[in-house]
Image: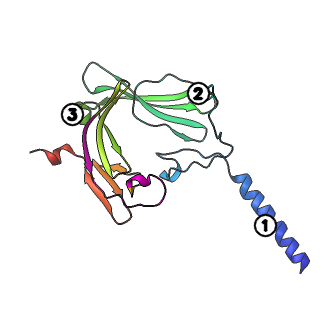
Amino acid sequence: MFHLLRRACIVFSISLATIMSSLRADDWPEWRGKGRGGVWNETGIVERFPGAGLKIAWRTPIRCGHSGPSVADEGVFVTDFLPTEKKGAGIERALCLDEKAGKILWSTEWQADYAGISYETGPRNFINNDRGELIIADLQPDGWREFSRNAHITPDNRRGGRREFGAVNWVHPAYANNHIITRNEQEIIRASLDGADYEK
């Protein structure tokens, strides 16, 4: 019996060691990370930022753009945009950078024309807060200007912080096909953000 138990413990230890050795720093292959779960599985992360700030491993100049970077197989993937004289038009580019050195490994570009989409209405940001509100605002280095605010879902989570509000909504929404999709503890909703739906 002792030998069987000892053998089982050795097998368990080897299995655990194998599993642990297979764990590695996660790639970030899509929006909000692998599986879009917003979970970062790193270990040994700083608990406080140093007084001099973060140590920058590299900086690589790129053009303007809105895409967040994705990381997979030691490559950093991002897009950028070079506007041309025609409003809304320009040259869009996809790039792959070396994750360790920041060197551009490859890029490909194409003509793009975004005239007629919502950018023409001016700089806008959609901010979903913990009160179940969606805010349309202009965020600039010199300040914030709110255009509009709408309560689209009832906050009903009473666990955790922000108790001064009684209940909050912690859910990160999805934005797809000109809609916001979000939920609380009782329902899931899809609401249109398409300006055409609200034209008189």
Q: Which residues are magenta?
A: 146-165
Q: Position of residue 43 (x, y in %)?
A: 67, 46
| Amino acid type for the residue under numbered disc 1 | Phe
Task: Examine the rendered structure and indicate whether residue 68 appears above or below residue 58.
Answer: below
The disc, 2 or 3, on the residue closer to the chain's N-terminal end is: 2
| Amino acid type for the residue under numbered disc 3 | Gly
Q: Give the Cα separation between the discs numbered 1 and 3.
A: 61 Å
Q: Give the Cα separation between the discs numbered 2 and 1.
A: 41 Å
- What label does residue 86 carry, if any? none
| Amino acid type for the residue under numbered disc 2 | Gly
Q: How many marks?
A: 3
User: Is 77 or 138 nearer to us in this picture?
Assistant: 138
The disc, 1 or 3, on the residue closer to the chain's N-terminal end is: 1
The disc, 2 or 1, on the residue closer to the chain's N-terminal end is: 1
**Residue position marked by numbered label 1 in the rendering:** 12
Asked if residue 7 is among those painted magenta in the image, a careful observer would answer: no
Q: Position of residue 130 (x, y in %)?
A: 38, 50
Q: Is residue 26 left or right of residue 30?
A: right
